[in-house]
Image: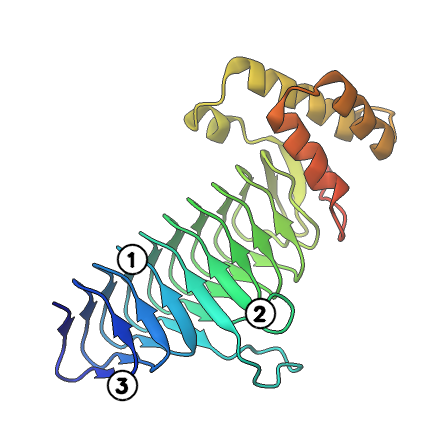
Amino acid sequence: MSQIHPTAIVEEGAQLADGVTVGAYSIIGKDVKIGENTFVDSHVVIEGNTSIGSGNKIYSFASVGKESQDLKYAGEETKTIIGDNNKIREFVTIHKGTTDKWETRIGSNNLLMAYVHVAHDVVVGNNCVLANNCTLAGHVEVGDFAIIGGLTPVHQFCRIGSYSMTGGASAINQDICPFMLASGNKAFLHGLNLVGLKRKGFKREDISNLKQAYRDIFRSDLSQSDALKRLRECYSDDKNVNFLVDFIDNSKRGITREQ
């Protein structure tokens, strides 16, 4: 059975699975679906075509599924999709998609700290940490296991690669490659995220190959295209190096480099 506080408003049509808790003065819109054992604290607003998985915890004054701030948005029927076991802290704002992706999507096992903003058409993977006041502009993509420091704005259409980490108060206006450390205003690379990779169980050979890939791309005399070609040839069986190469190949805003 769901537990709904008497002062909460759950509109007719909302679908709440078993074990959902809705706290005092929260509002759940008619097109919202919430999975099992998700906890919605007091004074939370969830509206729009929003689907939330199981085991999430959404803290007070969070706002999920409201219309985009994009001035081009004209009321199209778009979505907000959130996975399982996320922690969405106080005053987080998550806006639904526009006609770009038609949805804003957050995966599972993420921590969104207080005052994080997730704009329209953003895609956040799994097991990410977005620290306090991190702001993701529209169309940003964040890979799995990424960590974004507090007070960090990310420019629209940028990508934050998997297993990367950015320092607090950075300003990101180009893609951060997977496996990298970056910080500064504007952000610059500071090498591989070695501590993070070791904590996630990357083997010594994996890290050694990524170090060589880093040197070829960022510290050699090779052009970017030649460096990527060399890495494809020399590390054709290394999934991490190929993942990095593909990420760079698909960059539209360009990649963040060393200072």
Q: Position of residue 166 (x, y in %)?
A: 55, 44
Please name the amino acid that badge 2 sits on. Trp
| Image quadrant containing the C terminus | top right
Please name the amino acid that badge 1 sits on. Asn
Pointer 3 with pointer 2, Cβ within 8 A: no
Q: Position of residue 96 (x, y in %)?
A: 50, 72
For mark 3, what is the residue? 12
Q: How many marks?
A: 3
Above or below, comparing residue 48 to residue 135 in the picture: below
Above or below, comparing residue 88 to residue 235 in the picture: below
Q: Residue at x 48, y 65 (%)?
A: 117
Above or below, comparing residue 146 to residue 208 in the picture: below
Please name the amino acid that badge 3 sits on. Glu
Q: Secondary structure at mark 2?
A: loop
For mark 2, what is the residue? 102
Q: Position of residue 157 (x, y in %)?
A: 67, 59
